[in-house]
Image: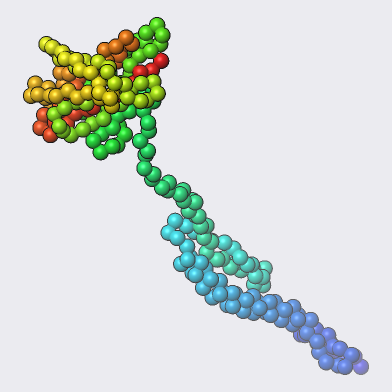
Amino acid sequence: MSHPRHPRTDLGTRSASGHSVNLREPKETDRSSRSREALNAILILVPILTIAGIMVWMLQPASAATGLLRVASVDAGQGETSHIYLPLVLKAWPPTPTPTPTPTATPIPTATPGTVMVYDMYGNVRDLNWAWEKYGVWIEEASPGLDGSVFRIVELREQSGPANIDVWVLGEGGGPMAGVTVRKSWPDGQVEQITDLDGRTGFGMGGGDKHPEGTSGPLSFEVVASAASDVGRGFGWLGGTAHDHFNIVFRLVR
């Protein structure tokens, strides 16, 4: 007798022991397992990476540039992939600071032939432009003689009082020259005096030698000798001061 065929309702087969084995179940189980593993990995990594990202962000300066960096990818199953991102901070390192130079006092140089040293009443080094702008003085340079010798003005030194302009004359070696004639002149007259053993002679000033700051005075000074001499012009004393003026140093050069 033949038995009727029943529709096949199971999708598996039987093992040698007679137990039914489902062929689809392992595939579905593997997929669910991978999904759970991916989810667990995400649940573990996200808080850690988030806290780390926040700490990195808080430690950066305001000038840092931020973005996102993908740090992990997890197979979530079902053909899907989950990505994990961490805040990316690009730190802008400040440039190496340049050391600030330590200021040093400017030494007062010794006047040498061919240069004109200008000092204010406090001993600070100035220049001829400063002397011109404040006192209106300038130097008319002389041409050397046949032997190359000439008396050059090598120093102007500001002084406040008395009402007297001192003139020194120095030799080639820088020592004082005694017995040298120095001439002071003004628009309608002149006077000559001889230097002493220190190479110095002093010329008094009166009310007519006063002039406002920034303008020239009426006095001129030069050495009268066999060698030609520079002429200092525009000298006098500043009105409204305690007879502020310049003293002058000539030096013989060849």
Q: Is residue 28 above or below residue 240?
A: below
Q: Is residue 189 above or below residue 122?
A: above
Quadrant (top left/top right/bottom left/bottom right) for the C terminus: top left
Residue that appears at 37% across and 25% down: 174
Where's residue 10, x and y in %?
77, 85
Q: Is residue 238 above or below residue 28?
A: above
Where's residue 81, x and y in %?
64, 67
Drawn side of residue 177 relative to residue 188, left or right:
right
Residue that appears at 62% across and 76% down: 41
Look at the image and name its color scheme: rainbow
Between 135 and 159, the one nearer to me in the picture:
159
Between 53 and 102, the one nearer to me in the picture:
102
Note whether residue 67 is visible. Answer: no
Quadrant (top left/top right/bottom left/bottom right) for the N terminus: bottom right
Between 78 and 192, the one nearer to me in the picture:
192
User: Residue 122 lies in what quarter of the image?
Assistant: top left
Between 134 and 148, the one nearer to me in the picture:
148
Where's residue 176, x and y in %?
32, 24
Residue that appears at 54% across and 75% down: 47
Q: How many marks?
A: 0
Extreme residue in the left direction: 207
Drawn side of residue 6 relative to residue 119, left or right:
right
Note whether residue 40 is visible. Answer: yes
Q: Is residue 63 above or below residue 213?
A: below
Residue that appears at 37% across and 33% down: 109
Extreme residue in the top direction: 146
Drawn side of residue 45 relative to residue 34, left or right:
left
